Every structure is written in structure tokens, then in C-alpha cells.
Image: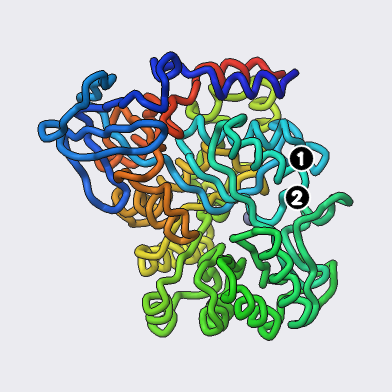
Amino acid sequence: MILCLLFSAGQAIAQPAEVLDPGSVVQSFNNARIIIGDGTVVERGSILIRAGIILAVGPASSMNLPAGAVSYDLDGQTVIPALVNTHAHLGWEAYGDWGSQFFTEENLTDHLYRHAYYGVGTIISTGSDKEDIASRVKLEQQKGNIGGARYHLSPGMGSPGGGPNPRFTDDPNYWGVNPVGDPEQAARTVRDLATKGYGIVKIWVDSRDQRRGSEVKLAPEIYSAVLNTASNYDMRIIAHATTLSDHKSLVDVGARRFIHMPYDTEVDDEYLAMVRANNVFIVPTLGMITKRESYYIPAFQDSFFYGQVPVSVLENLNKNYDPPPVNQDAAAVQRSTMLASNLLKLKDHIILGTDAGAVGDFFGYSDHVELALFVRMGMTPMEAVVAATSRAAQAFGLTDVGSLQAGKAADFVILDANPLNDINNTRQISAVYLRGQAVDREGLKTRWVLED
Ligand SMILES: [Zn+2]
């Protein structure tokens, strides 16, 4: 029953697009500030779209509208590309509960809509998706039966006993890690995953849980075999690693994408040179590591979140909340300063990823928290937007999304205020368009709030 509601929610388009033949009618969004996603802006611009694809973007004054085009005046508003989130864990979160038993087609689909509601157009779920269910949802989305954020899933590899945090692996029904104990097995696993059509694969290099033994860290000869074999395929590896020495060793053998920055120490010139020379992409997931900061605002106290969930969820979050200390100790302050310094040194390589769905961060909402943290830690709002759009797409070869240019998908967010003035204005969402169709945000919100 809920599944049917979900599907209809995706098709209930609030805009006139619904009654038009989307295959032929041109829609024109005029007079907006258009943040392209690549670092440039068109003031008083127009976006022309047809059949879910951008036909043209440019100054409104120079745009020729074909006869029969449907126009919308966005005077005073700003358009940004729909966000691209490269690190989350879909399916386990149940808004009030959590676990593998919630990984159903219905819940997974709901999470795609949660992202869409908040303006996230593309989501990569990393190393925790149940393959059969995930594949069905992905296929249904490709057929157009499910809307929401574009769903990409990435299987994982780790040493036997390694993998994600214990919250996942303590679940007796956890899946998602292909254990690889030696280079041959690693190479074989990469080939198998490539044969199955996977273009994104995660590896956990860190030791995550000492209870599972001392050999849980992925050995260099194994990740080397992974990266080597993957280079024969159209496959992008993203490595979970948190120390500077692991990052260097991984870049040395071909790693180009990381989940997490080096957290253990200040990054040095050698590392920065490697990152620049090899165009490395880094997902810092700051939201996850700043929860102990005094400025942290829990979701249940934030109207951008609490309007979208039932009261019971807020009550639970409130009850279980463990507030950060008002005064940080010296070590914590030093660590924050070091993280901000690393982020700024790496700012031209940073991409958006939230880890939402793994550690109590919520889908779509946490993307905006992360954007604000980028800026809080010293990036400009424009740098933050680029990190969350074109660069994130580029990191994974997602050529159809991430920027507002002719030929790309018509995935964009209309804002009532300019995020270049204040990054928190990404929260001033007037409408979200994915595949050229408006997301029924009101319908989704109404259903979520009542879902008790
Ligand atoms: Zn994660």
C-alpha cells in the first residue's frame, strides 16, 4: 500500500509539466540567477528544457523561445544544479528505528524521495545495499516507475572481518562487504563486480573494529591488486581511509577517490602535490566528525528537518540526544583547527558526501548541513556548491548531472535566496526539478509527517 503511494507521489507533478507532453513541450525558466555548478553564474538567465534534458542555458535576453514553450518567471530566485551526494547508506534508516530488516524496496525508494525533497538529484550508496533489492529498485527507476534521486550503488570490499562500522556488522544480516584476503581474491572480486556491471566499488582500508581481530586492515598488496585490476574496467574505486600515510600509499598505487580526509595529522606538501598531480577527489564527511562541536545543532531542533518527520521521531531524537560539551577541551579545539586547515588545503578536491543513513544523519537534510560546514571551515559558498555538484559528478564519471549545461539532465533546485550570499540559503527551496519534472515536495512532506 505504501509502495503504491510512493510511486504515485513521484508521478504527482505539481507543475503544468504533468498535463503537457513532456516529449515535445519546451519549458523555459526565466530571469533567474543561474549558478551553473562549474564556478560560473549567469545573472538574469534562462534555462530551456525538454523531455528531461537541458536544451540551453544563457542570458534571458538572448534566448529564443520556440512557439508553444511554457515559461516560468523566476525573477529574484536562484537556480542551482541538483546536488550530487557521493557517500550515503540507503535502506537501513527507518526514522525511529534502524537495521537490515528495513532494507526493503519500499524503504529504499522512500530514501530516494527524501533526497529529492531536499534537492539532492544523485545519490551513491556505498557498501551496504542488499544487491537483489537494490538492483530491482535501480531498474524500476531506470524504467521511470520510481522518481527521486538517481540511485547508484557501490558494492564494497574489505579484509575478512573488516568493512564498515560495527553498527552494520553487528547486524547478523549485514551484507555489502566482499571479503578479500589476498591479492588474487581481490583481483577476482573486482572482475566479478565488473562483469555484473558495477562501475563504483568501495574499499575499506581502515581497521574499524578491533573486536573482529587484528588483521582487519586492508593490506597494501591487496588494495594495490584492487586498483590495478579495476583500471582494466570502467570502474571507479573509492577508498575509506583516514590517515595521511594510508592516503599517500593508496594514491601511489592508483587510488583517486577517498571517503574521509586524513584526520590524524596536518596534511603535508608531499601529499598535496600527489593530490594535485593525480586529481584526487576527497569526501570529507564533516557532518559526521563535528557532532561533538559546541556549534552543532541537532536535527530535531532544526525546522529544516523537523517539518518533515512525525513528532514521535523528534521526541525520540530529543530523548536520546547527548549534547556536546559547551566548552571544548584544548585537544578538541586543536583537532577542529587541524581539520579546517586540511579542508582548506584540499578545497579544490573536496566533494559532497554525508554518510547519511549510517550514523544518525538524515537523508537530504544532512547535505545542507555539510554544505554549511564547508563554508564554516573556510571554503567560499561557490566552492561549496561546486564541491556538491559538478566536481562530485566528475569524480564518478556521472556526465549527465552536476551542472546546468545544454545536454545535461534537467535536475535543478530553485531557491528563494542566493546561496552565494549565505550558504544557508540552499535551504530556501522553492522547487526541485528532477528529469525536468517538479518533485511533489508538499505531497511527500504531508505523507512523512503523518507516517506515525
Ligand atoms: Zn559510510
Horizontally, is 439 left or right of 80 in the view? right
Q: Amino acid at mark 2?
A: Glu
Q: Which residue is mark 1?
A: 103
How much space separates mark 2 and mark 1, taking CA atoms? 11 Å
Q: Nearer the viewer, mark 2 or mark 1?
A: 2
Crowd around label 2: few <14 · some 14–19 · many ≥20 (10 Å): some
Q: Quadrant of the C terminus?
A: top right
Residue at 27% of width from left, 27% of height from top? 29
386 or 342, which is in the foreground? 386
Nearer the observer, 153 or 447 = 153
Q: Is residue 307 visible?
A: yes
Mark number displayed over residue 131? 2
Residue lying at 73% horizontally and 35% vertically, measured from the top left: 105
| Left or right: 439, with 229 as reference point | left
In what element is the residue under mark 1?
loop
Q: Residue at x 24, y 39 (%)?
A: 57
Q: Earlier in the sequence, mark 2 or mark 1?
A: 1
Which residue does the image show at 34% across and 42% down from the upper left?
Answer: 423
- Give the image location of residue 381, x and y in percent: 31, 48
User: Tags 2 and 1 in contact by the CB under 8 Å rule?
Assistant: no
Q: The residue tagged with tag 2: helix, strand or loop?
A: helix
